[in-house]
Structure formats: structure tokens, C-alpha cells
Image (cartoon, rainbow, N blue to C red):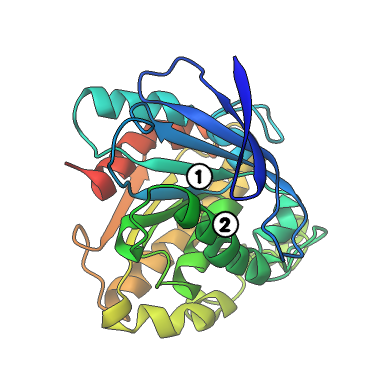
């Protein structure tokens, strides 16, 4: 069953997939007035009692929204976020939240800030600004949110994890919580040459400390008054194709560099404002990221 409605000048539809934890508002052509962004699909997962409660809720903004709740993306897979959240609610492990899942238009372009060999790149600056103002502005204006940055999370995996980290470091007054699963911190370093050449020259190209990503993030990371709460992870499985042998291997190597930088150069404290997980069974897949989501959400939204 689906019912159409209009909110904040945007056409949307209500649909209920039967999850105990909540129901959906989906905007098929979301476009904030005055924005030059192309229309895109956004799914919003609301607590089951949203329409009758008076409560305001923390918000999770999730990249790769086409795989968050329903099968999609390049491999027609899903994180099954509604099921994950429902399980946590039933165990009384997390507070009720609103999840805003933003579907990409051109994923390679929107989620990268630096060159990637033989791929579109360079749209992350504008995408992060779009999330911080157009999307978050609309959600805060039209839903009962807790708009404070320390109650607002940006979440993603792979390139989406890179985009989440970048967005939080550029807009800490909007997003003070960030979870980057298998993040592509290697973009701009190990991405600038054909990967077939790595067997001759080795996989490392420069140091993360000297990267454009860290240079851009530096003002936020070194400011104790804008201290982010950060979750990072990666998987240790190296079999099963290119996504594990190269992409997850690079996520691991550069993720460990990031962990060391955050602690040694920026004063982050592990298990206080920095949480790092190495998943010995983890792969570069939606299934692995979904399996780790209960831990992620419990860290940020525990009761």
C-alpha cells in the first residue's frame, strides 16, 4: 500500500513494508527549491509511532541510499537497515532514530574528491555541501528531528565511507558523528595510476598524512571544540575477487594509517571518540557492512 502526499513542497509517498521498527517516506524526485542539484530519490525510515508521538529524533544520513533498505546498486544487494534497526529496538539497545538514505546519481563522481584512474571523480565538495544544507535543511524543517550536530550522523561504506568522513570534517556544525565502513581513504593516493602497475611499483603512493583528504580535514580534526565521534572499520578477507584483494586491502592499509594519525597527531582517544573494528571475516560487501551495523548503531545511539 502506498499513499502519495506533499511535504515541504516535495511530492512523496508513504509505504509500509511491515517492519516492526518503522515505515517509509520516499521522495522519487527530491529537489530543494532554489537548488541546482538534479532530482534524486531519497528514502526516509521513520519510527513506527512517529505519527502519534511528540518525540524528536536523532538522524542518520546514509550514503548509497539505493542499497540501504532495498536491493540495489551495482550488485543488487542491500544492508537491510530496517531489519537491523528493528532488532535493536526490540532489544532496547538503541534510541529511536530517523534514517535518511540518499541515492546517488553518479556515485564515482559524487563520492570522490581526488583523481581515480579511469573513473569520474571530483564531485564530493558539492555533494557534501548539498547534504549539509539542502538535504539536512529540508529534513530538519519538515520532520521532528534533533538538529544538533552531536545528534546527527553521516554514514557510508567504501567510496560512501570516504564521502561520510569528508562531509563530517567539512561540516562539523551539521554532522558531529561519522561512521566510515571500509572507507576509500586510498582515493587520491593509490587511485591515481592504473592498478595493473602496482605489481611493479608496489601499492603505496604517498602517505595519508600528506594527502588532500587530511589537508582538507585538518581544521576540524585539530580543533578540540569540533571533535568528531568517529567509527572506522575494514575486513581482513583477501579471497573472493578484486573487491577483497585490492579495494578492501587498500581500505585496511589506509584505514590503519588514519587510525594512527587520529590518535598520534590529532589527540583522538580510542573507545572514547574513536572506534576501530577489524573484522576477520569481513569482506567488501553489503552483507559484511550490514553485519557490523548493530555494533555501529549501539556505539552512537545506545540507550
Location of residue 292 by image quarter: top left
Residue 41 placement (x, y as % from top left)? 68, 41
Q: Residues within 10 Å of mark 2 (few under 14, many from 20)?
A: many
Q: Residue at x 73, y 63 (%)?
A: 116
| Rendered-image quadrant of the C terminus | top left
Q: Is residue 31 left or right of residue 49?
A: right
Which residue is more in the foreground, 79 or 257? Answer: 79
Q: Residue at x 36, y 25 (%)?
A: 21
Residue 16 placement (x, y as % from top left)? 51, 20
Residue 179 placement (x, y as % from top left)? 40, 53
| Rendered-image quadrant of the N terminus | top right
Location of residue 120 by image quarter: bottom right
| Mark 1: secondary structure | strand
Q: Are marks 2 and 1 in contact (CB under 8 Å)?
A: yes
| Mark 2: secondary structure | helix
Q: Residues within 10 Å of mark 1 (few under 14, many from 20)?
A: many
Residue 113 visible within the image:
no
Residue 166 placement (x, y as % from top left)? 52, 67
Q: Earlier in the sequence, mark 2 or mark 1?
A: 1
Q: Which residue is mark 1?
A: 100
Location of residue 73 by image quarter: top right
Which residue is more in the foreground, 140 or 72? Answer: 140
- Indicate which disc residue 135 carries: 2
Q: Is residue 92 left or right of residue 281?
A: left
Amino acid at each position: 500500500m502506498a499513499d502519495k502526499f506533499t511535504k515541504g513542497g516535495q511530492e512523496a509517498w508513504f509505504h509500509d513494508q511491515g517492519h516492526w521498527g518503522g515505515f517509509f517516506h520516499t521522495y522519487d524526485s527530491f529537489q530543494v527549491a532554489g537548488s541546482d542539484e538534479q532530482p534524486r530519490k531519497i528514502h526516509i525510515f521513520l519510527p513506527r509511532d512517529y505519527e502519534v508521538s511528540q518525540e524528536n529524533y536523532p538522524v542518520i544520513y546514509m550514503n548509497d541510499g539505493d542499497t540501504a533498505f532495498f536491493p540495489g546498486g551495482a550488485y543488487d544487494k542491500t544492508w537491510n537497515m530496517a531489519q537491523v534497526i528493528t532488532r535493536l529496538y526490540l532489544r532496547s539497545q538503541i534510541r529511536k532514530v530517523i534514517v535518511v538514505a540518499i541515492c546517488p546519481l553518479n556515485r564515482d563522481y559524487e563520492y570522490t574528491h581526488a583523481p581515480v584512474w579511469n573513473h569520474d571523480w571530483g564531485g564530493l565538495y558539492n555533494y557534501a555541501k548539498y547534504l549539509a544544507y539542502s538535504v539536512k535543511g529540508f529534513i530538519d524543517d519538515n520532520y521532528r528531528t534533533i538538529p544538533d550536530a552531536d545528534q546527527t550522523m553521516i554514514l557510508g561504506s567504501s567510496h560512501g565511507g570516504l564521502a561520510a568522513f569528508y562531509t563530517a570534517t567539512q561540516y562539523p556544525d551539521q554532522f558531529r558523528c561519522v561512521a566510515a565502513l571500509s572507507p576509500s581513504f586510498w582515493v587520491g593516493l593509490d587511485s591515481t595510476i592504473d592498478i595493473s602497475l602496482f605489481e611493479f611499483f608496489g601499492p603505496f603512493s604517498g602517505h595519508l598524512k600528506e594527502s588532500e583528504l587530511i589537508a582538507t580535514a585538518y581544521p576540524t580534526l585539530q580543533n578540540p571544540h569540533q571533535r568528531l565521534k568517529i567509527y572506522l572499520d575494514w575486513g581482513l578477507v583477501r579471497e573472493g575477487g578484486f573487491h577483497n584483494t585490492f579495494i578492501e586491502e587498500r581500505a585496511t592499509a589506509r584505514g590503519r594509517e588514519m587510525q594512527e594519525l587520529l590518535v598520534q597527531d590529532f589527540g583522538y582517544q580510542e573507545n572514547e571518540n574513536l572506534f576501530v573494528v577489524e573484522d576477520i571475516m569481513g569482506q567488501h560487501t553489503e552483507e559484511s557492512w550490514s553485519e557490523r551495523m548493530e555494533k555501529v548503531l549501539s556505539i552512537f545511539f545506545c540507550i
